[in-house]
Amino acid sequence: MKYQYEMKIEIEKETEELDKLLLVKLKIQRNELLSWKLKRKSLDARKKPKLYFSYQFEIELKDKITQILLKKGVLKPITEKIKIETHSKGLKLKQRPVIIGSGPSGLLCAYKLAGKGLKPIIIERGSAVEDRVEAVNKYIRSGEFNERTNIAFGEGGAGTFSDGKLTTRSKSPLIQEVIDIMVASGADKDINYINNPHLGTDGIRDIITRLRKKIIDKGGTYIFNNAFKKLDYNKEKDELSGILLEDNTYIETNTLIIAIGHSAKDTIEYLNKEGIPLEAKPFSVGFRIEHQASLINKNQYGRDDIDTQTLLGNSEYHLTYKGNRGVYSFCMCPGGVVVPSNSYSGEIVTNGMSYKNRNGKLSNAAIVATVGIDDFPTGPMGGIKYQEKIEKLAFEYTGKDYSTLGQNAIDFVNKVKSTEIKVGFKPSYLPGIVMGNFWEVLPQNICEELKEGLIDFDRKIPGFIDKGFLTGPETRTSAPVRILRDENAMILGYNGVYAIGEGAGYAGGIVSSGIDGLKMAYGLLKEYDGVNN
């Protein structure tokens, strides 16, 4: 039987020879340790400036020493009951399944289906990741926006240009399968055990390319630079016959999986007109705040006598303030940059991105306040209209050239327009920054809440306001609409049409979206008895 064992060591004493450390800590001989596996590694800074690495192991020992250590309370039995809940189905596949969107949910669904011989067809409005990187770099350098391929649209979804966080609140055992697929596709093995693992934008790009090759090798088909246009659905017969693409290509299928991201507004608008059941849902809006990474590191680690950036990497933070609505930090990017993530022309939207090594000199995070459905115009499209109003106003405010609005955090708190950068560093956002006042772009009630949140965060991280620079707006924290589906992920009233992932309103982030995609695939495979080619 395997047991859980936990230990802490000072960061200066960290060693790669963890098996030897286990023997010393447990006071056992080499032949008494039958097997061991590192399950979790995290930083413990609760007693800073003393910093520790906390380790959690899964170990197997000889019976005699096991009993001794159990009596001492050193070991904890591991009793895992794994039950995988999937999206099941009652529909037989007649043609190849079609997946709209190549973000995490669509991608992992396609990967699993392809591995079982179902030969999925993946529709992606944007480019393959290689061409997408070129288009994004061109936009960042010159401000030349590509409405089809950008930070929101293209292979891999919006997460391709992010920090690549693999954190989730889900307790699903499918988390491990998501991690296993990532590792098998090129991710570092340490994402299995480090606390708050991430892939970085460079890591994600490599993984996506490898997954695409595997899917194609198993008979899957990708159609890039072509968007979904229309359902061919017979409501009298209650069946799907196929779909029409933007270039009028028709694809026969009775199984459609809608795995769009949270920014595909035109697709949501079409589904609403089609009569697909939708409902508005809460999300959050605000701005990005950027600091020198050294400021965050010193506060979080409590040390300036050692090179924490090299030893520990740039630090994360997670901040929350209850207030009336709730203000919180979101998508924190240590050593990262702020990037333009609008999905359509005439909008300004920001997001954060970092590379795997997170070694940049600046760190940023979204600071956002919750927006409820009572804040929206009525109807399922209310949240989208709310987003659009802010994003278009920001575009007009900054001169219609995709420069973002910038403001010193101290000026925002004092409700005055910024005319110059006062924080001692050059903010990372490109194509450019227009100094101004977020009180003239964001709703006043949101600004009041954000102001209170910043004041609270400054108590927790001294210098958060004085040394912080704001860019934004940040409006795409999650989907503002939910596609209504049953327990099988089938859209209500639409036999054979499924909705999964973040854009459908049922996930948030890479891992939870990937889990939703795997659940969808397992549900289809439960009834799979061959596909007509």
Image (cartoon, rainbow, N blue to C red):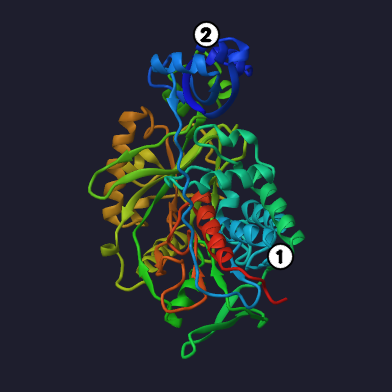
Q: Circle 2 — which element? A: loop
> For the residues carrying marks 2 and 1, which lies nearer the camera in this image?
2
Q: How many numbered marks are there?
A: 2
Give the residue type that dot 1 points to: Gly
How crowded pointer 1 is (Cα within 10 Å; few <14, some 14-19, many 20+) is rated as many
Q: Circle 1 — which element? A: loop
Disc number for residue 115: none
Residue drawn at (60%, 80%) of the image: 243
Which residue is the site of mark 2?
A: 27
Residue drawn at (67%, 52%) of the image: 208
Q: Is residue 202 left or right of residue 335?
A: right
**Residue 317 found in image quarter:** top left
Residue drawn at (63%, 58%) of the image: 112
Disc number for residue 220: 1
Mark earlier in primary sequence (2, 1):
2
Q: Residue 477, image x and y in percent?
A: 43, 53
Depth order, front residue of 123/97? 97
- What quarter of the picture does the C terminus occupy? bottom right
Separation (CA) of disc 2 from disc 1: 53 Å
Q: Residue 417, image x and y in percent?
A: 36, 47
User: Residue 507, can we see it?
Assistant: yes
Residue drawn at (60%, 24%) of the image: 35
| Residue most extreme to the bottom | 236
Q: Residue 419, image x and y in percent?
A: 43, 44
Q: Residue 401, image x and y in percent?
A: 55, 60
Give the residue type that dot 2 points to: Lys
Depth order, front residue of 253/160? 253
